[in-house]
């Protein structure tokens, strides 16, 4: 039996050595696995953070594009509304001027306009332009103007009023309601607070 004991002890020693080696290998393997898991977790975390960053950047860009588009739409709506307001106001103003053109005060307006024009115009070659409907006021206007003058119908005058020309001095005075309305439109645009910056 001594041989068997020796073999048993030898096998026990081998088994003990194998268990120790197995424990070392398991420990090294576990250490390697833990290290690889940490590396994988770090990589996954970095990848997820990069993905979150990319997604956040994409979302910001989308929101920025949407915001920009909405701002553009709002500005366009404001421009449109401003134009509507201007059109409404000056359409109403034109209606009132047309009503004034039909009133009894219109003739007095033409006479005042003719008197004021004499301060600016001298000479004999005076042409007074009026809309076709105002040709009936020729005598009254000429009397207020105080000089002989030539009258011409002018289809560019739609609301009313007078345009004066002095051929000798190449001077013109425009006192038409059309021009007054147009100048008020420019003034209104700059003073109304409807400017969109």
Image (cartoon, rainbow, N blue to C red):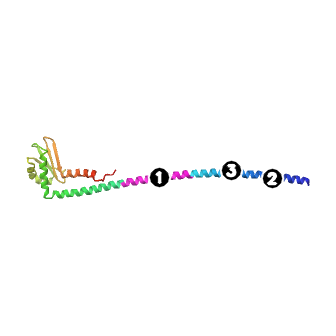
Q: Could you say which disc has been placed on residue 32 in the image?
A: 3
- The residue wearing badge 2 is 16
Q: Earlier in the sequence, mark 1 or mark 3?
A: 3
- Please name the residue shown 74% across and 51% down the image: 25
**Where does residue 195 sit, x and y in percent of width and height?**
31, 51
On the image, the x and y values in percent for residue 116 come to 13, 48
Give the mark nearer the N terminus: 2 vs 3. Answer: 2
Q: Examine the residues drawn in magenta and state their main secondary structure.
A: helix
For the residues bearing labels 1 and 2, Cβ distance under 8 angstroms: no
Rendered image: mark on residue 11: none
Q: Which residue is drawn at 90% across and 52% down?
A: 3
**Closer mark to the observer between disc 1 and disc 2:** 2
Residues in magenta, as a range: 48-74
Question: Of helix, strand and loop, which one carries label 3?
Answer: helix
Q: What element carries label 2?
A: helix
Q: How crowded is mark 2: few (under 14 residues within 10 Å), some or many (20 or more)?
A: few
Left or right, 173 with respect to 62, comes to left
Q: Which of 192 and 167 is in front in this view?
A: 192
Q: Alpha-carbon distance for marks 1 and 3? A: 41 Å
Mark closest to the chain's N terminus, 1 or 2 = 2
Left or right? Give the position of 55 relative to 168.
Answer: right
x and y percent of residue 124 in the render?
9, 43
Residue marked by disc 1 = 60
Is residue 62 on the magenta stretch? yes
Residue at (16, 45) in percent of width and height: 172
Q: Report the quarter where the N terminus lies.
A: bottom right
């Amino acid at each position: 039996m001594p041989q068997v004991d020796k073999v048993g002890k030898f096998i026990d020693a081998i088994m003990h050595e194998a268990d120790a080696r197995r424990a070392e290998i398991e420990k090294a393997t576990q250490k390697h696995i833990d290290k690889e898991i940490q590396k994988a977790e770090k990589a996954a975390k970095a990848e997820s953070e990069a993905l979150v960053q990319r997604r956040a950047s994409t979302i910001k860009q989308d929101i920025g594009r949407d915001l920009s588009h909405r701002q553009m739409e709002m500005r366009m709506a404001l421009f449109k509304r401003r134009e509507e307001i201007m059109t409404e106001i000056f359409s109403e103003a034109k209606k009132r001027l047309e009503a004034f053109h039909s009133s009894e005060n219109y003739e007095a307006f033409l006479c005042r306009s003719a008197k004021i024009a004499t301060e600016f115009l001298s000479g004999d070659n005076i042409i007074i332009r009026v809309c076709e409907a105002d040709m009936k006021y020729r005598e009254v206007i000429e009397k207020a103007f105080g000089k002989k003058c030539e009258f011409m119908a002018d289809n560019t005058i739609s609301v009313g009023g007078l345009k004066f020309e002095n051929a000798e001095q190449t001077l013109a005075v425009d006192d038409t309601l059309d021009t007054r309305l147009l100048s008020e439109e420019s003034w209104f645009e700059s003073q109304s607070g409807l400017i969109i910056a």
